[in-house]
Amino acid sequence: MEKVSTLTIEEKEFFMKEAIKEAKKAEAMAEVPIGAVVVLDGKIIGRGHNLRETTQNATAHAEMAAIQMACDQLDNFRLEDAQLFVTLEPCPMCSGAILLSRIDEVYFGAYDPKGGTAGSLLNLLEDQRFNHWCYLESRVLEEECSDLLKTFFRNLRQRKKEEKQKAKENNEKD
């Protein structure tokens, strides 16, 4: 049985832009800029952005926060008929949470070739051996999502290079 998207291109872009807003919140906190929203019946019921550095919690991913908020909103762990929008391809942990929460449709922006499990390393979300699987669509506003990450890491490398240079100069003065 094949699953299909229930959303228009305009709806997909609108909700991915909301996920991008969440990613920018993470970026403003010096977190890796990843954002997510959970949508049900055309309304956002969960939002989240990456908070791993801030919380020093390995599970503080954007998807996990958005799913938790959505479950709290519905007072139910089942998010059937919901869609998840995330700026970066989900990791194994987040893919597991997506499946366990019964989200029907997943849309992501940029691929994660080093950790993604929605097509890059493997595809957990469409694996029909599980009791639940999702409709999956990639590359929604891919360029914008990818550029956020590229810019963040370019700036981070530059800051580290400058800090290293400054430390070297201070050591030479001593």
Image (cartoon, rainbow, N blue to C red):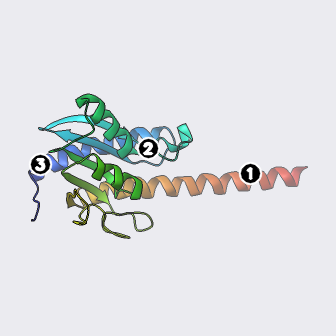
Q: Return the disc, 1 or 2, that comes first in the chain's sequence.
A: 2
Question: Of 39 and 8, which appears nearest the observer?
Answer: 39
Q: Are marks 2 and 3 in contact (CB under 8 Å)?
A: no
Question: Which residue sits at x=35%, y=56%?
Answer: 90
In percent of width and height, residue 173 lies at 88, 50
Measure the alpha-carbon separation of dots 1 and 2: 29 Å
Q: Are marks 3 and 1 in contact (CB under 8 Å)?
A: no
Question: Which residue sits at x=38%, y=63%?
Answer: 116
Assign a secondary structure to mark 3: helix
- Disc 1 crowd, CA 10 A, few/some/many (<14, 14-19, 20+): few
Please give left or right for residue 33 compared with residue 124 in the image. right
| Residue under numbered circle 3 | 10
**Image quarter of residue 146:** bottom left
Assign a secondary structure to mark 2: loop
Please give left or right for residue 96 compared with residue 40 in the image. right
In percent of width and height, residue 37 lies at 28, 41
| Residue under numbered circle 1 | 166
Question: Of 44 and 67, which appears nearest the observer?
Answer: 67
Q: Which mark is residue 127?
A: none
Amino acid tagged 1 = Lys
In percent of width and height, residue 129 lies at 25, 66
Q: Which mark is residue 50?
A: 2
Please identify the residue farthest to the right as the structure is shown.
174
Measure the alpha-carbon separation of dots 3 and 1: 48 Å
Please give left or right for residue 5 compared with residue 160 in the image. left
Assign a secondary structure to mark 1: helix
